[in-house]
Image (spheres, rainbow, N blue to C red):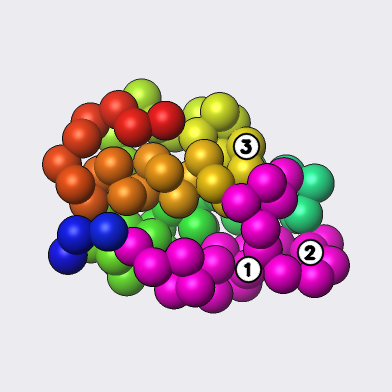
Amino acid sequence: MKGLPWDTFTDLVAQFLVRLTGSVERDTNLEEAGLDSLALVELVAEIETRINVDFPVELLNWDTFATAGTLHAATVGLLDGEENSS
Protein backbone atom coordinates (compact mmCIF):
# COMPACT_ATOMS: atom_id res chain seq x y z
CA MET A 1 0.00 0.00 0.00
CA LYS A 2 1.61 3.22 -1.15
CA GLY A 3 0.49 6.45 0.40
CA LEU A 4 -2.16 6.93 3.01
CA PRO A 5 -5.30 8.96 2.30
CA TRP A 6 -5.68 11.84 4.75
CA ASP A 7 -9.32 10.97 5.51
CA THR A 8 -8.45 7.37 6.37
CA PHE A 9 -5.64 8.56 8.61
CA THR A 10 -7.68 11.21 10.42
CA ASP A 11 -10.56 8.81 11.04
CA LEU A 12 -8.13 6.50 12.81
CA VAL A 13 -6.30 9.22 14.78
CA ALA A 14 -9.44 11.06 15.91
CA GLN A 15 -10.46 8.04 18.02
CA PHE A 16 -7.51 8.74 20.35
CA LEU A 17 -7.99 12.50 20.72
CA VAL A 18 -10.34 12.91 23.67
CA ARG A 19 -10.11 16.72 23.73
CA LEU A 20 -10.43 17.23 19.97
CA THR A 21 -12.88 19.93 18.99
CA GLY A 22 -13.65 19.99 15.31
CA SER A 23 -11.82 17.99 12.70
CA VAL A 24 -8.24 16.76 12.60
CA GLU A 25 -6.13 19.17 10.55
CA ARG A 26 -2.49 18.84 9.58
CA ASP A 27 -1.50 21.35 12.25
CA THR A 28 -3.63 19.79 15.01
CA ASN A 29 -1.42 19.51 18.09
CA LEU A 30 -1.98 15.90 19.14
CA GLU A 31 -1.00 16.38 22.77
CA GLU A 32 -3.33 19.38 23.17
CA ALA A 33 -6.10 17.34 21.52
CA GLY A 34 -5.73 14.66 24.20
CA LEU A 35 -2.98 12.30 23.08
CA ASP A 36 -1.16 11.29 26.25
CA SER A 37 1.49 8.60 26.62
CA LEU A 38 -1.02 5.78 27.08
CA ALA A 39 -3.10 6.90 24.09
CA LEU A 40 0.10 7.22 22.06
CA VAL A 41 0.96 3.57 22.70
CA GLU A 42 -2.57 2.53 21.77
CA LEU A 43 -2.49 4.70 18.64
CA VAL A 44 0.83 3.21 17.52
CA ALA A 45 -0.56 -0.30 17.97
CA GLU A 46 -3.67 0.62 15.98
CA ILE A 47 -1.67 2.21 13.15
CA GLU A 48 0.68 -0.76 13.01
CA THR A 49 -2.23 -3.20 12.87
CA ARG A 50 -4.58 -1.37 10.51
CA ILE A 51 -2.02 0.14 8.17
CA ASN A 52 0.51 -2.69 8.40
CA VAL A 53 3.64 -0.74 9.29
CA ASP A 54 6.15 -1.09 12.11
CA PHE A 55 7.29 2.05 13.88
CA PRO A 56 11.02 1.89 14.59
CA VAL A 57 12.01 3.04 18.06
CA GLU A 58 13.67 6.15 16.55
CA LEU A 59 10.23 7.46 15.54
CA LEU A 60 8.59 6.85 18.92
CA ASN A 61 9.03 10.38 20.22
CA TRP A 62 6.98 13.55 20.66
CA ASP A 63 8.50 15.09 17.51
CA THR A 64 6.84 12.41 15.37
CA PHE A 65 3.57 12.80 17.29
CA ALA A 66 3.62 16.61 17.55
CA THR A 67 0.90 17.21 14.98
CA ALA A 68 -1.36 15.16 12.80
CA GLY A 69 0.77 16.25 9.84
CA THR A 70 4.05 15.03 11.34
CA LEU A 71 2.51 11.69 12.25
CA HIS A 72 0.95 11.31 8.81
CA ALA A 73 4.28 12.11 7.14
CA ALA A 74 6.08 9.55 9.31
CA THR A 75 3.46 6.89 8.58
CA VAL A 76 3.54 7.57 4.83
CA GLY A 77 7.33 7.40 4.98
CA LEU A 78 7.12 3.97 6.60
CA LEU A 79 4.68 2.82 3.94
CA ASP A 80 7.09 4.04 1.28
CA GLY A 81 9.93 2.14 2.93
CA GLU A 82 11.76 5.10 4.47
CA GLU A 83 13.21 4.55 7.92
CA ASN A 84 13.19 8.17 9.03
CA SER A 85 10.55 10.36 7.47
CA SER A 86 9.85 13.01 10.08
x, y percent for residue 66: 62, 37
State the SS at label 2. Answer: loop
Whole-number angstrom distance, CA of label 2 to CA of label 1? 7 Å
Disc 2 residue crowd, few under 14, some 14–19, many 20+, Cα 10 Å? some
Closer to the N terminus: mark 3 or mark 2?
2
Residue 81 located left or right of residue 75: left
- For disc 1, the marked residue is 14
**Which dot marks residue 51?**
none
Circle 1 SS class: helix
| Amino acid residing under circle 1 | Ala
Q: Is residue 33 left or right of residue 24?
A: right
Distance Cα–Cα, label 3 vs label 2: 14 Å
Identify the amino acid type marked 2: Leu
Residue 83: give x, y in percent of width and height.
23, 31
Quadrant housing the N terminus: bottom left
Return the x and y of residue 14 as percentages of the image width and height: 63, 68
- Write the residue at 32% across / 70% down: 50
| Residue carrying label 3 | 66
Count the numbered circles shown: 3
Q: Residue 12, can we see it?
A: no
Using residue 21 as the reference point, say whether residue 28 is left or right of it.
Answer: left
Disc sitting over residue 20 in the figure? 2
User: Which residue occupies 36% across, 25% down?
Assistant: 58
When the figure is inspected, residue 54 is found, relative to residue 45, above or below; the finding is above
Tell me, yes or no, if residue 61 can be seen here: yes
Name the kind of residue labelled 3 in the image.
Ala
* Closer-to-camera residue (39/63): 63
Tell me if label 3 and label 2 are in contact, CB under 8 Å. no
Look at the numbered discs 2 and 1 and tell me whether their residues touch, using CB distance below 8 Å: yes
| Numbered disc 3: secondary structure | loop
